[in-house]
């Protein structure tokens, strides 16, 4: 696994916050607004943290930029919700849990 630069990771609460942040960044090269479009996205767990790494490219000049987001807090919340759901699965008798 590639090491990531966590020092500049942007703390977000949900995926929507990631895309909102990216969409509001002007291109560092040509300064066009709403420039970056997503190329690839990776989820990385490292050092007790969870990160989304999004590689983007300016749709006007082709400049590439990588954004790193710290999603540790939101990832833990989702994990707690999932574990809680499965822990209490007997309460949800109408769901077919064996499929």
Image (cartoon, helix red, strand yellow):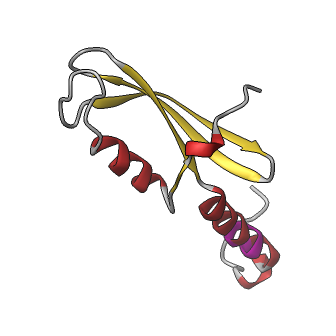
Q: Residue, x 69% and y 80% (percent of image)?
A: 92
Q: Residue at x 40, y 54 (%)?
A: 16
Q: Is residue 10 above or below residue 79?
A: above
Residue 17, image x and y in percent?
Answer: 41, 55
Magenta span: predominant SS is helix
Q: Position of residue 63 (x, y in %)?
A: 34, 18
Point out the stretch of residues depicted in magenta.
81-85
- Res 89 quadrant in image: bottom right
Residue 53 vs 55, above or below: the answer is below
Task: Give how far across and how far down residue 96 sits, in percent.
Answer: 71, 66
Counting the numbered discs, the total is 0
Q: Is residue 88 above or below residue 46?
A: below
Q: Which residue is found at the position 51% from the left and 63% from the top? A: 13
Residue, far bottom: 91
Res. 26 image quadrant: top left
Name the outermost residue toward the left. Answer: 32
- Left or right position of 52 against 80: left
For this view, does 97 lie left or right of residue 26? Answer: right
Is residue 36 shown left or right of residue 12? left
Quarter in which the C terminus is drawn: bottom right
Q: Position of residue 80 (x, y in %)?
A: 72, 70
Q: Quadrant of the N terminus?
A: top right
Q: Nearer the viewer, residue 99 or 27?
A: 27
The answer to whether residue 34 is left or right of residue 45 is: left
**What residue appears at the point 43 percent right and 49 percent down from the top-left corner?**
18
**Can residue 37 be found in the magenta stretch?**
no
């Amino acid at each position: 696994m590639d090491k990531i630069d966590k020092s500049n990771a942007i703390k977000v609460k949900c995926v929507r916050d990631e895309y909102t942040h990216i969409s509001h960044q002007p291109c560092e090269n040509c300064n066009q607004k709403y420039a970056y479009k997503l190329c690839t996205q990776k989820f990385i767990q490292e050092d007790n943290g969870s990160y989304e790494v999004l590689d983007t490219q300016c749709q006007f000049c082709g400049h590439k930029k990588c954004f790193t987001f710290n999603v540790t807090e939101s990832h833990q919340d989702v994990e707690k919700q999932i574990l809680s759901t499965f822990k209490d699965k007997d309460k949800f008798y109408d769901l077919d849990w064996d499929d």
